[in-house]
Image: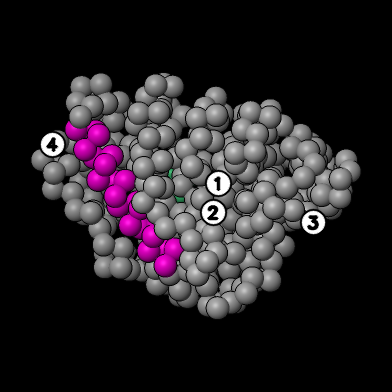
Amino acid sequence: MTVLKNDCFLRALQRLPVDRTPVWMMRQAGRYLPEYRRVREQAGSFMTLCTTPELACEVTLQPLERYRLDAAILFSDILTIPDAMGLGLEFVEGEGPQFQKPVRTAEDVRQLPIPDPEKALRYVPDAVRLIRRELDGRVPLIGFSGSPWTLATYMVEGRSSREFRKIKGLMYEQPELLHILLAKLTESVSLYLNAQITAGVDAIMVFDTWGGVLSPVQYRQFSLNYARLALSSITRERAGKKIPAILFTKGGGQWLEAMAASGYDALGLDWTTDIGDARARVGDLVALQGNLDPQALYAPIPTLRAEVRQILERYGEGSGHIFNLGHGVWPDVNPEHVGAMIKAVHECSPALHRGGAI
Ligand code: CP3
C-alpha cells in the first residue's frame, strides 16, 4: 500500500491538526494551462481525454508539476453517468454539453439503465488505478460525481440551461416521475463513487452545481435528500482508512445547517458566503472548502494576495479549512496568477495553525 507523503488535505477534511491550510482548485486541470490545451488538441476532443486513461492521467498530473497543490482531482466529467445511460453526450465547441436523447417522458425514465461502473464506465476506474500508480503517494486523489439533482437537470434539459424550464416543469407537473429519475440516479452515483473508491481515490466530492436554483423546500426534497441517500450507500473506508466526502452546492449558502447535518465530512462554499460566518453556523459538524471568487484571479497580484489573506483570516485559527475557489477556474486565467494564489496560501496560512493570527 502506498503511504501518502502529503496528507494535509485529508487531515483538514477530518479537522485534525495541520501545519498549514491545504489548497487545490476546482478545474485545476483545464484550458487555462497551455500544456492541457496541447494534449486536448492532439486528442481531438474533451471526451477522448476522459475515456483514454493514459490521457486522463497525464492531464490530472499537469497542475501538480507546476504548483504546490495538496490534492489531485480525477480528470473526468460529471456527465459520464448520463452518457453511460445512453443519452448520447456531445460537447459542442462554444456551446457546452448536449445530449442527443434527453429524458422527457415516463417511458424515457423507465428505460434508463443503471450503469455498471466496471463495464460502461470502466475507463473511469481504469484512470483512477493509473493515476494512483503515477501519483505514487505524492498527494491524495479526489474522485467525484455530479449530484442526482444536477445530473437530472442536464438529462432533462438536454443541455446547459439558465431558466431550467423543462426540469422545473417536470418538478411541478409530475413530481413523482422526477423522484423515480432521482432514485435511479442516486443508485448510479453510489455505484460509481464506490467503484472509484475501490479503484483508489482517497476522498470523494459531489458537485451539486444547480441545487441553488431551487426554493428551500424543493432543495431539501429534490437535491439534498438524494445527495444524502447516495452517500448512505457509499463505503467510506478502504483498508481501515476513512474516505472523506465533500458536498458542494453552488448557491447553497443559506442551507449550510441542513447540509452540515447530511452526513458529509465537508462542505464546499461558493464566494457569496462569508467563510467565517459559515464556520460559526456549522460548528464542529463539518470542514469547509473554498471560497475565493474565481474572478479574483484576474486581479493584480497584490489584490489577489489580499483576497486570499482575507479568506484565511475570516476562517480563522485551526484546522478544518481547505482553500479553493468558489467555483471552477476560468479558461482565460493567467497561470501565473494561479501560482500567486497558491503561494499566498503557503505563506499566509502557517501562522493560523500555530495558534496565531496572520
Ligand atoms: O476539477 C477538475 O480539475 C476535474 C475535472 C472536472 C471537469 N468537469 C473537467 C472539464 C470536473 C470536476 C468537472 C465537473 C463538471 N462538469 C461540472 C460540475 C462542476 C461545476 O463546474 O459546477 C459540470 C456542471 C460539468 C459539465 C460540463 N463539462 C460543462 C458545463 C463543461 C463546459 C463546456 C465548455 O465548453 O466550456 C464541461 C467541459 C469540461 N469539463 C472541461 C473540463 C476541463 C472543458 C473541456 C474542454 O477541454 O474543452
Q: Mark 4 points at which residue?
A: 106
Q: How crowded is mark 2: few (under 14 residues within 10 Å), some or many (20 or more)?
A: some
Q: Mark 2 points at which residue?
A: 244
Query: Which element type, helix, strand or loop, lies under badge 4?
Result: helix
Image quadrant in which the C terminus is located: top right
Q: Which amino acid type is marked by label 3?
A: Asp
Q: Earlier in the sequence, mark 2 or mark 4?
A: 4
Label the magenta part by its dominant secondary structure: helix
Residue at x 76%, y 34% (from the top left corner): 314
Image quadrant in which the N terminus is located: bottom right
Q: Can I make out residue 98 in this image?
A: no
Q: Mark 3 points at which residue?
A: 19
Is residue 182 covered in magenta? yes
In this view, the mark in front (2 or 4): 2
Is residue 101 covered in magenta? no
Q: Which amino acid type is marked by label 2?
A: Pro
Residue at x 66%, y 56% (from the top left corner): 11
Which span of residues is magenta-colored?
177-198
**Quick check: marks 2 and 4 in contact, CB under 8 Å?**
no
Q: Name the residue under label 1.
A: 265
